[in-house]
Image (spheres, grey):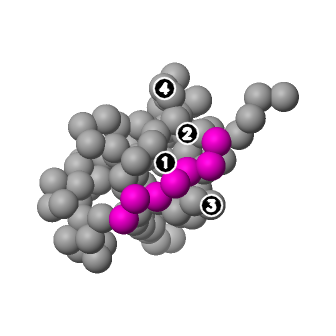
Amino acid sequence: MTNLAPTVVIRAARGSDGVALDDLARLDSQRPPVGDVLVAEQDGALVAAVVGDRVIADPFRPTADVVELLQVRAARGGRDLGGHSRVRIPRLRAA
């Protein structure tokens, strides 16, 4: 039996990530991110995000390596992502 490492994708956040980013922030007891957000998906689920020096990560998953990758990519200034683009993350309204 082969033990494959999970697939990790690092990318700029999209507007459609708003709900997932809100959920991730809530899990990590933080406020939702705004501005230039870089996210990491692991097997299709958002598990971490970086906004400037601020890190948001799923506390129920081992994300230290993923966060380190995000920070390295963020330090490059988004050059590997085709430059920064400001993403407007829609916020859910309280009922």
Q: Give the residue pinned by disc 1.
A: 47
CA distance separating discs 1 and 4: 14 Å
- The amino acid marked with disc number 2 is Leu
Main SS type for the magenta part?
Answer: loop
- How would you rate the neighbour count of disc 3 (Cα within 10 Å): few for under 14, some for 14-19, many for 20 or more? few
Determine the secondary structure under disc 4.
loop
Q: Are marks 1 and 2 in contact (CB under 8 Å)?
A: yes
- Magenta highlight range: 85-91
For residue 66, the mark is: none
Q: CA distance from mark 3 to mark 2?
A: 14 Å
Instruction: Determine which residue is flagged by label 4.
Output: 30
Percent of width and height locating residue 40: 42, 56
Query: In this rendering, would 56 be left or right of 71?
Result: right
Where does label 3 land, which residue? 16
Q: Residue at x 48, y 26 (%)?
A: 30
Residue 22, given in percent of the width and then of the height, sits at 60, 39
The residue indicated by pointer 2 is 24
Kind of residue at badge 1: Val
- The answer to whether 81 appears left or right of 43 in the picture is left
Q: At numbered mark 2, what does the secondary structure look like: helix, strand or loop?
A: helix
Q: CA distance from mark 4 to mark 2?
A: 9 Å
Against 20, residue 79 (above or below) is: below
Disc nearer the start of the sequence (1/2): 2
Q: Image check: 61 left or right of 37? A: right
